[in-house]
């Protein structure tokens, strides 16, 4: 049985993620760090070639996919995917991206077990130092 998610945990995490995402290169920092959580999937991108477009690094959390913005930008490209079909493609502001990442992240980590939840909390704690909220 996984412990219940406390709403203040997700709210505090959203604030921290928002602060880091608003920094230059923030999406790369946040998404690669969240990619270390066992319940999440981090797919490395590939460079473009003559007849092939570049594919950015992608973090998958449940039904959400987040791309590392290339070149580094403040908007975070995201997709809501249901059964393999993207039902929504959007670019999220740091504030909205932080809320979605925190909410989806805590739900997915809690579903996966204690190890994922602890890892997510440690990643958010580490990012709080970058955000100056330690």
Image: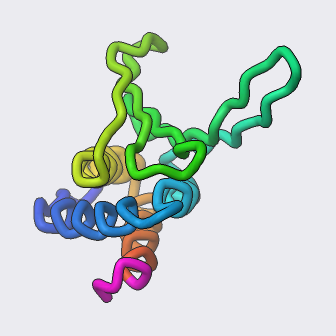
Instruction: Please tell me which residue is depicted at 34% across the width and 27% down the height of the picture.
Output: 90
Vertical side of 70 occupied by 15: above or below: below
> Where residue 15 appears, x then y in whole percent?
22, 66
Q: Residue 14 at x, y = what percent?
A: 24, 60
The magenta segment is: 129-134
x then y, percent, for residue 25: 53, 61
Q: Is residue 43 above or below residue 130?
A: above
Write the residue at 77% across / 35% down.
46
User: Quick check: is 131 in the magenta stretch?
Assistant: yes
Residue at the far bottom: name it: 134
Q: Quadrant of the C terminus?
A: bottom left
- Say left or right for 75 vs 98: right
Count of labels in the image: 0
State yes or no: residue 12 in magenta: no
Q: Residue at x 42, y 74 (%)?
A: 127
Its colouring scheme is: rainbow
Between 48 and 39, the one lying in front of the other is: 48
In this rendering, is residue 53 above or below 69?
A: above
Q: Residue at x 29, y 70 (%)?
A: 16
* Residue 60 x %, y %: 49, 38
Can you see residue 24?
yes
Task: Give above or below for 90 relative to 96.
Answer: above
């Amino acid at each position: 049985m996984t412990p219940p998610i406390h709403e203040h945990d997700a709210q505090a995490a959203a604030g921290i993620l928002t602060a880091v995402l608003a920094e230059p290169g923030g999406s790369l920092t946040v998404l690669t760090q969240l990619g270390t959580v066992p319940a999440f999937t981090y797919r490395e991108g590939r460079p473009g070639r003559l007849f092939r477009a570049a594919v950015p690094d992608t973090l998958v959390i449940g039904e959400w996919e987040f791309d590392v913005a290339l070149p580094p930008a403040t908007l975070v490209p995201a997709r809501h995917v249901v059964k393999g079909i993207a039902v929504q493609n959007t670019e999220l502001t740091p504030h909205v991206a932080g809320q979605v990442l925190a909410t989806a992240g805590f739900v997915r980590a809690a579903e996966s077990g204690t190890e994922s939840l602890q890892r997510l909390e440690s990643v958010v704690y580490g990012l709080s130092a970058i955000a100056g909220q330690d």
